[in-house]
Image (spheres, rainbow, N blue to C red):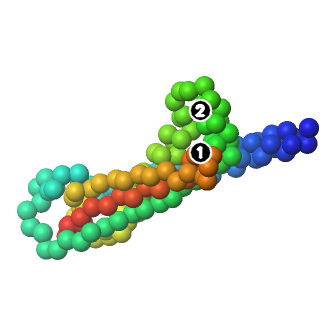
Amino acid sequence: MGEIVLFSALIVVGYISGSHIEKKHFKALKRREWLTREMRVSTQDELYGERFISKSKMVVGSVVISPDYFKVAYASVVNMFGGNISVYEALMHRAKREAVLRMKESAKGAKGIVCMRIETSSLSQNATRQIGSVAVVAYGTAIY
């Protein structure tokens, strides 16, 4: 009985703290995206209208984000029955946005970034094969 209470308490604490941290992170992402809105990013090898490039350099932004207890528990239940694991979608969305922002911030002063790519990887926990955390790397060529 004590194990069920402890598990339930962890789920509640994980849900409350995880939701708070996630909302805070989304708010910070929105503010930082506003600050970097002028920098154009393209997956193509050139930016429209840019003809003169004085220099270029590779820029990288990477992040590793872990889910909270609630997301892990919810994903375990959904995994038993099959279906869309929406809590992990939000985790991936946050991680991708953060990686792109870090890449843009590392290209300070650039006109834009070309050939942008995003790589994702899930890091599983031991033999349970559940997602322990998500690693995302965004990279490209900053042009000046």
From the viewer's perspective, tell me whether residue 93 is left or right of residue 9.
Answer: left
Q: Where residue 92 sits in the image (x, y, percent)?
A: 48, 46
Give the secondary structure at mark 1.
loop
| Residue lying at 24% horizontally and 71% vertically, measured from the top left | 57
Mark 2 vs mark 1, CA separation in Å: 10 Å
Number of numbered tags placed on the structure image: 2
Question: Mark 1 sits on what residue?
Answer: 130
Contact, mark 2 vs mark 1 (Cβ under 8 Å): yes
Disc 1 residue type (three-letter): Gln
Q: Residues within 10 Å of mark 1 (few under 14, many from 20)?
A: some
Give the secondary structure at mark 2.
helix
Q: Where residue 91 sits in the image (x, y, percent)?
A: 52, 46
The image quarter containing residue 70 is: top right
Specify the label residue 103 is tagged with: none
| Residue lying at 37% horizontally and 53% vertically, measured from the top left | 119
Specify the label residue 79 is tagged with: 2
| Residue lying at 13% horizontally and 74% vertically, measured from the top left | 54
Q: Nearer the viewer, residue 69 or 59?
A: 69
From the viewer's perspective, tell me whether residue 10 is left or right of residue 2.
Answer: left
Disc with the residue nearer the chain's start (2 vs 1) = 2
From the viewer's perspective, tell me whether residue 98 is left or right of residue 21.
Answer: left
Q: Residues within 10 Å of mark 2 (few under 14, many from 20)?
A: few
The image quarter containing residue 52 is: bottom left
| Residue lying at 17% horizontally and 74% vertically, measured from the top left | 55
Q: Where residue 112 sits in the image (x, y, percent)?
A: 24, 61
Residue 23 can be seen, yes or no? no
Disc 2 residue type (three-letter): Asn
Q: Quadrant of the N terminus?
A: top right
Asked if 79 appears above or below 88 in the picture, the reply is above
Q: Quadrant of the C terminus?
A: bottom left
Q: Nearer the viewer, residue 77 or 129?
A: 129
